[in-house]
Image (spheres, rainbow, N blue to C red):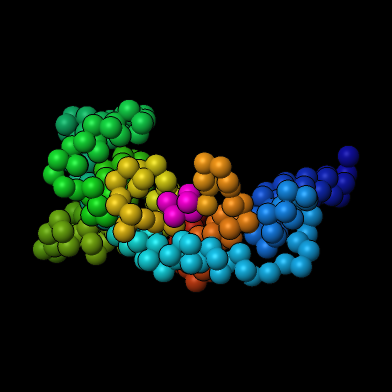
Amino acid sequence: MSKHAKNWILGIIGLVLGLLWLFPFYLIITNSFKTPKGIFSSVIGLPVGGTFGNYTQAWAALDFIRSLFNSLTITIVSVVLICLASAMAAYAIQRNHSKISNVILMLFVAAMLIPFQSVMIPLTTIFGKVQMLNIPGLIFMYLGFGASLSIFLYQGAIAGIPEALDEAATIEGAGPGRIFFTIILPMLNPMTVTVAVLNIVWIWNDYLLPSLVLPQSGYTIPLQTFFFFGQFTKQWNLALAGLMLGILPVVVFYFFAQRWIIKSVTDGSVK
């Protein structure tokens, strides 16, 4: 088979896979403009007489401004704390060559294997006793659950940074804190972007943990969307419009941050 034919086959396969990946988004977008009758009569078809009425109703039902503020607060604060604390912990573990450091790293790795469902009841019970079933308590939980994978990723990245840089900075009179924040942390930008994206996707879309922790005044967008599904009725048109409203902030974030994301990934691949 010629190289030209192989390129054509690979292109067709890529196109088919791309269409399959985009198909769920097509369903969400088209059905968010339909009436309930229109959805059940034709799920795949284009909306007939589409209207933005679903979006205005979903906006009001979601209490979107408050829900968006809660989601943004929880996600931004949690991700910043996870990145900063995990990078510092990974730096201390990697640069401290001892058996204790290896044991601590293995404990963090082992913690990734513990399913959340096995600890959610005692966790919420303990936090309830200390009056921490609120947004700050949820952020603290995210820091604990997100640290294991983040430390593991940061530790591997720091292992590739020569210790000679630390030694040279120490000779110049820099302390551990200054070495970390002025030398090590900037070199971790590609990994920081990776860790941030992974945690943003997880925290922004999380439903189970916030549903156990947050009072109604602190509900995020995923929690508010659940109210479209009642015991006897399911408002799919409003739910899909609400999902689109929930996806939109992430799309806007990527649109404005793609230059830094691509740059960080490129820098990491070059290194």
**Magenta range:** 223-227
- Front-lying residue, 217 or 69: 217
The image position of residue 43, as x and y in percent, is 74, 50
- Front-lying residue, 152 or 172: 152
The image position of residue 119, as x and y in percent, is 29, 31
- Front-lying residue, 247 or 113: 247
Q: Dividing the image into 4 quarters, which one contains the N terminus? A: top right
The image position of residue 139, as x and y in percent, is 27, 52
9 sits left or right of 55 in the view: right
Is 55 rendered above or below residue 101? below
Type of secondary structure dominating the magenta stretch: helix
126 sits left or right of 154 in the view: left
Q: Residue at x 31, y 59 (%)?
A: 217
Q: Residue at x 43, y 65 (%)?
A: 63
Quadrant position of residue 73: bottom left
Quadrant position of residue 178: bottom left
